[in-house]
Image: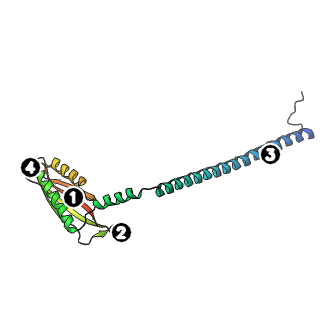
Amino acid sequence: MNKMSWDEMPSQQQMKAVGIALLLVCSVTSVIWMSKNTFVRVQDSRDQIHATITLKQDVSQLRTQYLEADSASLKADFEYADHLLIQNVPHLAQWAQELQRQGKQLNLNMQYRIVKTAQATTPANGLTVVPMEIQVLPDGTPNTYRAYLQFLRTLEQSRPRLDIQKVTVTGDGQQATRLTIGLAVWMK
């Protein structure tokens, strides 16, 4: 075996072998690097194509469902939604008086008022949102908190479409003495 010392210069043939080996390593590295970038781009393109195909299928399915919708069913749904609206101001008063009657059954006194006379229109054409405030007081019975909760449940289950916006319960340290409810009632 021929050992080379640091003092000796490598031969020209050894230099060629090292140069070729270095060139081979660089070539293989650059081919792998370019292949990796190409693979990533191909994978991204494949993912985009798959997302586009899925989106087209979803749109097609929605169009099919829309075209197959039962017009009688839609009409019934619209009639039911219309049934959930307060029809006019006298109807609003009747609904509030019915709430007062239900409050009496729970030993509660209820007062209501329309908060603003200028009614805000909703995003849906032809509908009006009427802001109201309801104050509920106990009718001389202890343990009014449970009655207040029952009244809130009754209010939520009442027929017209409404949005409860604020609920405040005040008390004297011993019991709940007043329930105040801010709400908006939907009217035609």
Q: Is residue 84 visible?
A: no
Q: Quadrant of the C terminus?
A: bottom left
- Judged from the image, the secondary structure of the residue bearing numbered disc 3 is helix
Percent coordinates x, y for residue 100 in the rendering:
14, 58
- The residue beneath circle 3 is 27
Residue type at mark 4? Answer: Thr
Residue type for callout 3: Ser
Residue holding disc 1 = 181
Residue 125, numbered label? 2
User: Relative to residue 60, is residue 1 depicted above or below?
Assistant: above
Alpha-carbon distance for marks 1 and 3? 78 Å
Q: Residues within 10 Å of mark 2 (few under 14, many from 20)?
A: few
Check whether the beta carbons of the residues at disc 2 and disc 1 lie within 8 A of each other.
no
Q: Residue at x 54, y 55 (%)?
A: 60
Q: Secondary structure at mark 4?
A: loop
| Quadrant in which residue 3 is drawn | top right
Mark 1 touches mark 4? (CB < 8 Å):
no
Outermost residue on the top side: it is 1
Q: Is residue 34 visible?
A: yes
User: In terms of depth relative to the viewer, which is nearer, 156 or 167?
Assistant: 156
Residue at the far front: name it: 72
1 or 3: tag closer to the N-terminus: 3
